[in-house]
Amino acid sequence: MEVVAAAREVVAAVWQASRSIREAVATLRGASRRTQATAQAGGRQVIAHVVSFTPRATLTREERQALVGDLERALQAIPEIRRARIGRRKVLGFGYDAVGPVHFEFVLILEFDSEADLRTYLHHPAHVALGRWFHHGAEVALAEDFELADADGVRQLAEG
């Protein structure tokens, strides 16, 4: 029962942090930066850093708070992040819900205007601090990077 209560606290803390994070990121970036970034990217392509994870059920309350704090600091301190979104897995009862070797409780999706911006983020001291949680605080985690385009760019998939 303690594990369930601890997991619920982690979920609540992450959801609360995600609201604060979205507001902070929007404020820090400002409308003019978003407009400029969209124009530079042609309104179509961004680099997404996708981190799927399930926090360890054994994390203490202090560790969970430190994880959320490190995430907030990284998102506020690293101006190259164009957009940040976090979410919890939603099971809808379709066949794909059961497919796959592992299921993640949360996903963090960070968007960047360029590969250079993503690399800057990855080497930033605030990300390095956050990265400790990837190994220490997660029961299971996966990080991958993707080039994303608007749907009208779907033909690019065929071009390889």
Image (spheres, rainbow, N blue to C red):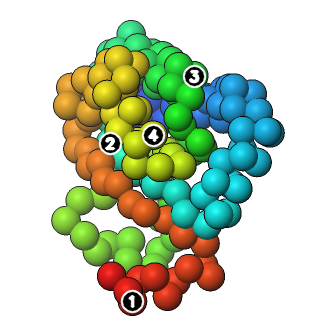
Indicate which label's residue lies in the foreground, 2 or 4: 4
Mark with earlier residue (2, 3): 2
**Vertical placement of residue 67 versus 35, above or below:** above
- Residue drawn 40% across the image and 19% down it: 126
Q: Is residue 107 left or right of residue 128?
A: right
Q: Which residue is mark 4?
A: 117
| Mark 1 and mark 2: Cα distance apart in space | 33 Å
**Vertical placement of residue 160 versus 61, above or below:** below
Q: Which residue is mark 2?
A: 54
| Mark 1 and mark 4: Cα distance apart in space | 26 Å
Give SS at disc 2.
strand
Q: Amino acid at mark 2?
A: Thr
- Residue drawn 60% across the image and 43% down it: 83
Q: Amino acid at mark 3?
A: Gln
Q: Is residue 55 left or right of residue 33?
A: left
Give SS at disc 1.
helix
Is disc 4 in contact with disc 3, using a CB cutoff of under 8 Å? no
Is disc 2 in contact with disc 4, using a CB cutoff of under 8 Å? no
Image quarter of residue 40: bottom right
Q: Which residue is mark 3?
A: 76
Point out residue 123 in the picture as x, y percentages from the top left corner: 31, 28
Closer to the camera in the image, 146 or 85: 146
Mark with earlier residue (2, 4): 2
